[in-house]
Amino acid sequence: EDKVVQSPLSLVVHEGDTVTLNCSYEVTNFRSLLWYKQEKKAPTFLFMLTSSGIEKKSGRLSSILDKKELFSILNITATQTGDSAVYLCAALSAGGAGKSTFGDGTTLTVKP
Amino acid sequence: SQTIHQWPATLVQPVGSPLSLECTVEGTSNPNLYWYRQAAGRGLQLLFYSVGIGQISSEVPQNLSASRPQDRQFILSSKKLLLSDSGFYLCAWNPGGNTEAFFGQGTRLTVV
């Protein structure tokens, strides 16, 4: 059975802190690892990682994939209150159906 | 540009009543379509996916069914709701292959 595990499940930090969110996966026919941000309703896409060791970066957010250790991290530097959200990690399987297996998410709370 | 519409946003239904949630996608053709359910504090569980009209794959045994009567329309149904059907339901699409999913705003279903 395909499995994605995220840690920690919740995290409370203060503005300006740096956080690291973790995601491990065991998925047959793995293709890519995706990160989403969910604030209220619809998750919104952050990153897709297909190759090991290549960092993806967008502003204060960055992410990297280790396909040997089946692991990915999402880093957020200089956190702001607007970063408060649930961060979801998903493993995309190969094949035309484009199925993803999601972790339970990390709930990040950034306090002023 | 592509958009996804999902309705209703919230729904309160008595146990034993029927259910119909609708999702439509605009601006693309032959999308992969997905229904997910999210329990409180949990990640997204894939319920159904469809790669074409009339083609439905079920991921978990349950009290729900899905149909795709048109290329860009995906419907989630139940003949008789159970209390355990309560949750947050998300419709999503992707164009297939190695791409992220795009989500609707979700339906919060409460079965009473």
Image (spheres, rainbow, N blue to C red):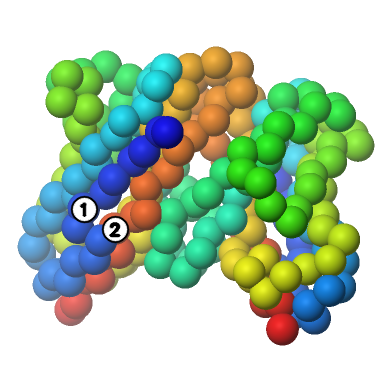
Q: Position of residue B71 (x, y in %)?
A: 84, 30
User: At 46% across and 24% down in the image, what residue appears?
Assistant: A93
Q: Which mark is residue A7?
A: 1
Tell me, yes or no, if residue A4 can be seen here: yes
Q: Nearer the viewer, residue A36 or B58?
A: B58
Q: Where residue A66 appears, x then y in whole percent?
A: 18, 25
Q: How many marks?
A: 2
The quadrant the N terminus of chain B occupies is: top right
Q: Amino acid at mark 2?
A: Thr
Rendered position, B22 above or below B3: below
- Residue type for callout 1: Ser
Q: Which residue is mark 2?
A: A106
Mark toward the start of the polypeptide (1 vs 2): 1
Q: Which class describes the residues within 10 Å of circle 1: few (<14), some (14-19), or many (20+)?
A: some
Residue located at (12% from left, 72% from top): A14
Labels 1 and 2 share a subunit: yes
Residue A35 seen in render = no
* Tag 1–tag 2 contact (CB < 8 Å): yes
Q: Which mark is residue A52?
A: none
Classed neighbour count for the residue bearing mark 2: other residues with Cα under 10 Å, few (<14), some (14–19), many (≥20)? many
Considering only vertical position in the picture, is B96 above or below A87?
A: above
Residue situated in front as seen by the camera: A46 or B50: B50
Q: Is residue B31 left or right of residue A7?
A: right
Element under disc 1: strand
